[in-house]
Image: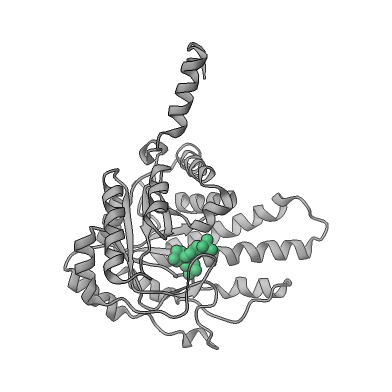
Amino acid sequence: MIGLIRHSPRIQIGLFLINYTMPYKYEELGLSNTKAMFDKALDEGFAVPGYNFNNMEQLQAIVTACAETGSPVILQVSKGARTYANSTMLTYMAQGAVKMVREELKSDIPIALHLDHGGNFEICKACIDSGFSSVMFDGSSLPYEENIKVTQKVVEYAHARGVSVEAELGVLAGIEDEVQAEKSTYTDPDQVVDFVTRTGCDSLAISIGTSHGAYKFKVDRLEDVPPLRIDILKDIRQKLGRKYPIVLHGSSSVLQEYVKIINENGGNLEKAFGVREDQIREATKHGVAKVNIDSDGRLVMTAMIRKILKEQPKVFDPRKYLGPARDELIKMMKRKNAEVLGCAGAYIRG
Ligand code: G3H
Ligand code: 13P
Ligand code: ZN
């Protein structure tokens, strides 16, 4: 600002326009792409969490949990999150989160800002230009060759700017705001090598039995949840013949303790289970380097907010229910990092 005052008004306007129309560079925001964190994850047998955020409390919880457990983290933004929170706002929120981690939490964990389920080249480009260090192009619903074509285009644009690209082969079932499919189609291991080689994507999301949302498996007991197709995962890994980061979407466990709190406090969620946590842990031993979790966080926040508002009907200060919801989210994510993903301690300096 002080520098600008010395210039003529016309130059000031010019500088202002340059500043606000130039693409952001993720390095300048303190973010990392996913290359080094995935290499480490594959070498050490853990997975990096891909946690979604839409608001400040979720973002604070994610970075606090990951800084306190010394875990790398991928901050995920969906198309719905961009609409809800505003894409410019999200970039600056991520920058603020990085500063909070470095300056207040005194942690040097790597932090990536990632577009989740990018549906076309344009949204991937927009995110890269607004400071994202990683994007997903989700062409899983497209014909194979079309998926390859668009993924290649995204990779070319992203790699010229040091940005990582996640792609997807196979279809996950489940319904959320912007992501939906009625039934899953497992990834065909025979297509994987061709797809990865021709597109040059940096990681690949596959379908081996996980699904999106809070209604994954409508069975009576957790023991009845079908196990993941680890055999397909192993086959894919063997065919790739090298360490390569595999991604699992739809990996929430639909934590029953929070479903219970929601339903005891005026909610009406149907009985359903999610992916078994021991299955996720098992997958991290066979090349899964990134695990996406969104629904479990939504359940945690909703449970705490419902409980507090029911127990304390006079409360009208949002901090009184959003604060405890954020604290519970931190607790849940710290446990996931330690017990499910195995990434806790990966970045604690010894
Ligand atoms: O897999 C999708 C994420 O959970 C984002 O969901 O589209 O409702 O933001 P959303
Ligand atoms: P869940 O709905 O299982 O949390 O999956 C989230 C996800 O895959 C985000 O891309
Ligand atoms: Zn997903």
Give the image's coloring scheme. one colour
Whether residue 38 is visible here, answered yes or no, is: yes
Ligand 3's quadrant: bottom left
**Which residue occupies 27% across, 64% down?**
148
In this rendering, is residue 172 above or below 56? below
Q: Is residue 349 above or below residue 296?
A: above
Extreme left residue here? 241
**Figure quadrant of residue 325:** bottom right
Q: Using residue 56 as the reference point, say whether residue 7 is left or right of it.
A: left
Judge by depth and name the residue closer to the eye, 157 or 135. 157
Can residue 293 be seen from the camera position used here?
no
Left or right of 68: which side holds 191?
A: left
Q: Residue at x 57, y 59 (%)?
A: 329
Q: Position of residue 155 (x, y in %)?
A: 28, 53
51 or 82: nearer the viewer:
82
Residue 138, compared with residue 98, is above or below; it is: below
Q: Residue at x 50, y 83 (%)?
A: 222
Query: Residue at 36% of width from left, 79% of height from top?
Result: 185
How many labels were placed on the picture? 0
Instruction: Locate residue 339, reporting x and y percent.
Output: 43, 66
Q: Nearer the viewer, residue 207 or 252?
A: 207
List x then y, in percent, for residue 217.
50, 82
Choose between 55 and 289: the one closer to the eye. 55
Q: Position of residue 240 (x, y in %)?
A: 19, 69
